[in-house]
Image (tube, grey):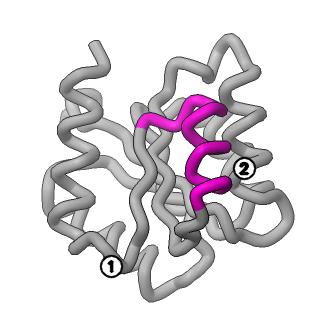
Amino acid sequence: MNNTSKQKILLVEDDTFLSSMYGQKFQLEGFDVQLAEDGEKALEKITAWQPDLILLDMMIPKISGAEILKKIKADEALKKIPVIVLTNLDQRAQIQECVNLGAADYLIKAHYMPSQVVDKVKETLSGKI
């Protein structure tokens, strides 16, 4: 069993239905997926697991998505990990803040099918190296 070839995705999402749906979709596409339902667990998993890409909701318990993004981008060991914001917040100021903080992309959940999110992840990862 060779898991080293699988790309690692961390999905930070507190909605269990959405995290399960996206988690299954990414597993079916051949990714190694871990889930975090709040900001504290997300930071623990990011540090310990070092995912290849992070899908980050903004509205999560304990530590906000924006704070997590700031912490990732301020950390030398983590800042190269691409972060795609996947949220329902569609205010211009929020989008601009995330882009300024270094998010690779900003996707509004209601505007994307899961298959389109997978395509965005693949696109981001292929341009990573």
Is residue 10 among what the camera can see?
A: no
Magenta-colored stretch includes residue 102: yes
- Residues in magenta, as a range: 92-104
Q: Is residue 3 magenta?
A: no
Q: Is residue 68 left or right of residue 123?
A: right
- Three-letter residue code for mark 1: Met
Q: In the rendered image, which quarter contains the N terminus? A: top left
Residue 96 in the image: state x and y as whole percent: 59, 44
Q: Is residue 62 left or right of residue 90?
A: right
In this orientation, which residue lies closer to the viewer: 37 or 64?
64
Q: Residue at x 78, y 71 (%)?
A: 61
Q: Give the camera-side residue of 42 and 59.
A: 59
Secondary structure at badge 2 equals: helix
**SS at mark 1?**
helix
Whole-number angstrom distance, CA of label 1 to CA of label 2? 23 Å
36 up-or-down from 47: above or below: below
The answer to which of 58 and 22 lies nearer the viewer is 58
Residue beneath label 2, please? 66
Q: Which mark is residue 21?
A: 1
Residue extending furthest toward the right = 62
62 over 102 or under it: above or below: below
Q: Position of residue 64 (x, y in %)?
A: 77, 59
Q: Quadrant of residue 12?
A: bottom right
Q: Earlier in the sequence, mark 1 or mark 2?
A: 1
